[in-house]
Image (cartoon, grey):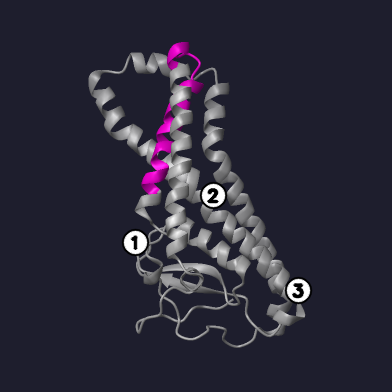
Amino acid sequence: MSLSEARTAEGSGRGAPPSRAALLWRPVGYFCLAWAWVLLWLVAVLLAPGAIVYVALDDEIILGQVLGETPVFGWVMLVLVVVPILAAVMGPAASFYLPTMAWPLALLCFTYAFRALRPSYAGERLSHTTHAPRGTSLGPPTIGTVALSLKPLRPSRFTDGLMKWYMAGWSLEMPTFLAALPAGLGWVLLFVWASRDIADPVRVACLALAVVLVLLSVVLVARALRKDFRRWTPRDAVDGESSPSTRAPSAR
């Protein structure tokens, strides 16, 4: 997604100052949200390696025998359908997007929670929501625009950096997606390596190639992100580009 396509409100979006009840409860709310995102980040980080560990420790998984009994049509479906799907899910999705969706939001929520404890922030709201066109951002399917929440109303150098990672995790950028695909193929090879009923020479070859593919993805994703970070300005990351059809953000 191009950050200039994000729909935002006209004006600052700070709105009316929060009520007394909101001032009392918002530190608790932001701390709870922060730890929820930390938990989601841990699940995302452990998903891909955890699956490999499970295969390595489960003696009932007999991948070699299953592959040896697979007919030709099954091999065609495996190569053309199953492997690409697994590569996309365990590469871009599990190895990049899910963790990158979670940790910037966790740090932003911790930032708002500490700001909520400071008297200098008592007269203003701390975060707001913008809306992006449907199909340009990750998340569950929606009928209308996609809400991108927990954006700072008072940016700083720290939150500007977090927002670039935020948009990297929530926007659909094809160069980044393609850059993470080799890691997905590497995960498939690691799955084969973890299956101990496979011949040792095959397992060693799969492990070596998997390491190369994962390192390749690290390099390619880093290059793609550098280009995006140079292209995205702090204002883009926080607010997007205003347009006559923008919708007012819901401030928190």
Residue drawn 47% across the image and 48% down it: 222
Residue at numbered disc 3: 117
Residue at numbered disc 1: 135
Q: Is residue 199 visible?
A: no
The CA distance from mark 2 to mark 3 is 28 Å
Label 3–label 1 contact, CB within 8 A: no
Label 2–label 3 contact, CB within 8 A: no
The CA distance from mark 1 to mark 2 is 20 Å
Q: Is residue 32 left or right of residue 103?
A: right
Q: Is residue 155 above or below residue 232?
A: below
Identify the amino acid type marked 1.
Gly
Question: Which quarter of the rendering shows the C terminus?
Answer: bottom right
User: Residue 6, located in which quarter of the rendered image?
Assistant: bottom left
Residue 18 at x, y = what percent? 65, 83
Dot 1 surroundings within 10 Å: few (below 14), some, or many (20 or more)?
some
Residue drawn 36% across the image and 45% down it: 178
Q: What predominant SS class does the magenta segment belong to?
A: helix
The numbered disc on residue 235 is none
Residue at numbered disc 2: 99
SS for callout 1: loop
Residue drawn 48% across the image and 42% down it: 218
Name the outermost residue toward the left. Answer: 73
User: Residue 22, located in which quarter of the rendered image?
Assistant: bottom right
Residue 149 at x, y = what percent? 52, 68
Residue drawn 70% across the image and 68% down it: 113
Q: Is residue 49 above or below residue 205?
A: below
Q: Is residue 69 visible?
A: yes
Magenta residues, start to end? 177-202
SS for callout 3: loop
Q: Which of 208/172 is in front?
A: 208
